[in-house]
Amino acid sequence: MTALEEANLRRYYDQRAPEYEQIYLPRDQQHACELGELSRELREALRGRHVLEVACGTGYWTACAAGVALRVTATDASLAMLAEAREKPLPANVELLARDAYDLHDLPSDFDGGLATFWLSHVPRARLRAFLDGFHARLVAGAVVYLADNVYVPGVGGELLPADRAGDTYKVRRLTDGGRHRVLKNYFSTEELRTVLAPGTSELAVRAGKWFWSARYRTALVR
Ligand SMILES: C[S@@+](CC[C@H](N)C(=O)[O-])C[C@H]1O[C@@H](n2cnc3c(N)ncnc32)[C@H](O)[C@@H]1O
């Protein structure tokens, strides 16, 4: 993904911000059930922790984490998405910050929890390692990380374009103003996720349902 495409992704989310949370409206019983499962897993993973969240968006999962975490530092690159999050009655243990997920170096490095939901699918495959290394560098050894994202469901969320030479796939997304956006959206098998997430981690558990996958692990005790 070029710098221009990255800027496009941010612009797309700037424009999508007011309508973003429609994705959480239950599509069928299984969808609602799996969302509930993500919420349960997330709360179990991050209870009592000082959490760094990347690409927090409108704060949908930030609110969930904040209910059980000690503190949540929630970051996103889109000011419009953060503005939606600021509209929420988030508890006082939440701090919202504008940050690029690939450039977290000025944040403290003492978080013992990490959270990134519906973000990994937007990371170009060639940048997965760099993103994870930069993210993990802000966490203490043995921190618990919880990730979740979409499973590919044909016909949902726009047309899927064939993979480019880098192996990245894109979706054509339409917003309610009629605007069309080509957005990087990668889907991972559970095997791919294990391969990507295993280096430098322990206790890795990956699970996939019909709609969503989730992963929980600890950052390595020795670096
Ligand atoms: C699919 S949304 C996920 C939002 C939220 N985590 C959720 O689960 O509802 C992807 C988010 O990534 C953010 N984003 C896009 N590029 C980013 C970047 N380079 N750094 C940080 N956030 C970015 C967008 O603004 C958007 O909020």
Image (cartoon, rainbow, N blue to C red):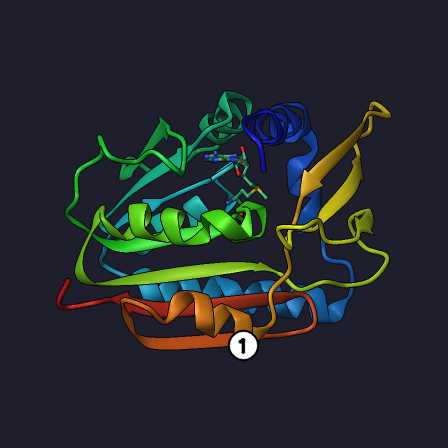
Residue 196 x/y as whole percent: 44, 65
Element at badge 1? helix
Q: What residue is drawn where x is 27% and y is 53%?
A: 136
Q: Is residue 81 left or right of residue 163?
A: left
Q: What residue is drawn where x is 71% and y is 42%?
A: 22
Depicted 183 relative to depicted 28: above or below: above
Q: Amino acid at mark 1?
A: Glu
Q: Is residue 28 left or right of residue 165?
A: right
Q: What residue is drawn where x is 55% and y is 22%?
A: 80
Depicted 195 relative to depicted 141: above or below: below
The mark total stands at 1
Residue 197 x/y as whole percent: 40, 66
Rendered-image quadrant of the C terminus: bottom left
* Residue at which label 1 appears: 191
Q: What residue is drawn where x is 60% and y is 65%?
A: 188
- Asked whether residue 85 appears in the rendered view, the answer is yes
Depicted 221 relative to depicted 133: above or below: below
Residue 127 x/y as whole percent: 46, 47
Rendered-image quadrant of the N terminus: top right
Q: Is residue 158 left or right of residue 223?
A: right
